[in-house]
Image: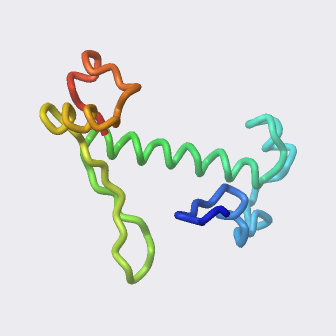
Amino acid sequence: MRYAVGYAWDLPEIFENFDSQALKIDGVSLNRLYGDRHKKQFCYKVFKECCKIVVNDIIENDVEFSLPTGSRKTYLRMRTYRDVAFRDARKNGKFMKVDFLASNFSAN
């Protein structure tokens, strides 16, 4: 028996209610500029790049990103493990693929 212990969305689910016809660019221009004429695929690419930019900004600049969720306050932030905390987490099995010398004994 399998139990659901969490939930994640994939890109088609995130853009399920998105009206791609509202984009004012045609398929020919999309194909010429980005190599794919589908508007949803273009939206997926833009969304993924934006997520990469946000996560890299959180990691590199130690910022807290506020999500636009309306009345609820929701934030993305990253916890950095350094020195003793990194050592203890590594002893417990975390960060086994992290090169501790190259990362200067820190990980996110």
Q: Nearer the viewer, residue 46 or 88?
A: 88
The N terminus sits in image quarter: bottom right
Outermost residue to the right:
28
Outermost residue to the top:
101
Quadrant location of residue 108? top left
| Residue plotted at (45% across, 43% down) | 53
58 versus 18 height, above or below:
above
Q: Nearer the viewer, residue 18 or 62?
A: 62
Display colour scheme: rainbow
Residue 79 x, y percent position in the rendering: 26, 48
Quadrant location of residue 100? top left
| Residue plotted at (75% across, 49% down) | 41
Outermost residue to the front:
1
2 versus 52 height, above or below:
below
Residue 77 x, y percent position in the rendering: 31, 54
| Residue plotted at (25% across, 38% down) | 89
Report whether 48 appears left or right of 11.
left
Report whether 48 appears left or right of 55.
right
Q: Nearer the viewer, residue 65 or 13?
A: 13
96 versus 4 height, above or below:
above
Quadrant location of residue 37? top right
Residue 4 x, y percent position in the rendering: 59, 65
Outermost residue to the bottom:
71
Q: Nearer the viewer, residue 2 or 30?
A: 2
Residue 68 x, y percent position in the rendering: 43, 70
| Residue plotted at (35% across, 32% down) | 95
87 versus 76 height, above or below:
above
Report whether 32 appears left or right of 51.
right
Total numbered circles = 0
